[in-house]
Image (tube, grey):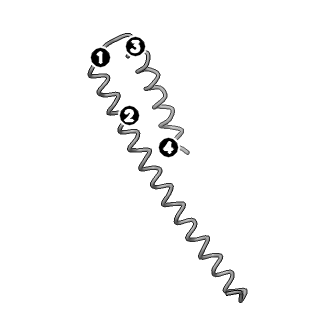
Amino acid sequence: RKFLNVYLDGVERVIDGYAKTHAQVAAPQLDERFRDALSTVEAAFREQQQVLLERDVEDLDVQIEVLTTQLEREGIV
C-alpha cells in the first residue's frame, strides 16, 4: 500500500504537469524524460507485483502446511 500511495501520487503529479506543459511548449528533452520516467515506474510496478505474487504463494504454502498438519493431528489423513 505504501508503495502505491507514494508512487501513484507522484505519477499523477508528473502526468498532470506534463499534460499542461506539453500542450503549451515543444520540449523534446522533456518528452524523452517523461517517457523514461514512465518506463521506470512501469518496471517498478512490475517488480512490486512480482513481490506480491511471491508473498501470496508463500502465504498459500503456509496455509496448506497448517491445514495438512491439522488434518494429520485429527487423524483424518
Report the quarter where the C terminus lies: bottom right
Q: Nearer the viewer, mark 4 or mark 2?
A: 2
Q: Secondary structure at mark 4?
A: helix
Indicate left or right for 44 with 76 as reference. left
For badge 2, the amino acid type reads: Leu
Q: Secondary structure at mark 2?
A: helix
How much space separates mark 1 and mark 2, taking CA atoms? 17 Å
> Furthest residue to the bottom?
75
For badge 4, the amino acid type reads: Phe
Which residue, given by chain and number where applicable, does mark 2 sit on? 38
Which residue, given by chain and number where applicable, does mark 1 sit on? 27
The residue at the point 47 percent across, 50 percent down is: 49
For badge 3, the amino acid type reads: Ala
Report the quarter where the N terminus lies: top right
Which residue, given by chain and number where applicable, does mark 4 sit on? 3
Q: Whole-percent x and y of residue 40?
A: 36, 39
Q: Secondary structure at mark 1?
A: loop
How much space separates mark 4 and mark 1, taking CA atoms? 30 Å
Q: Nearer the viewer, residue 58 or 2?
A: 58
How much space separates mark 3 and mark 4, taking CA atoms? 30 Å
**Residue 15 found in image quarter:** top left
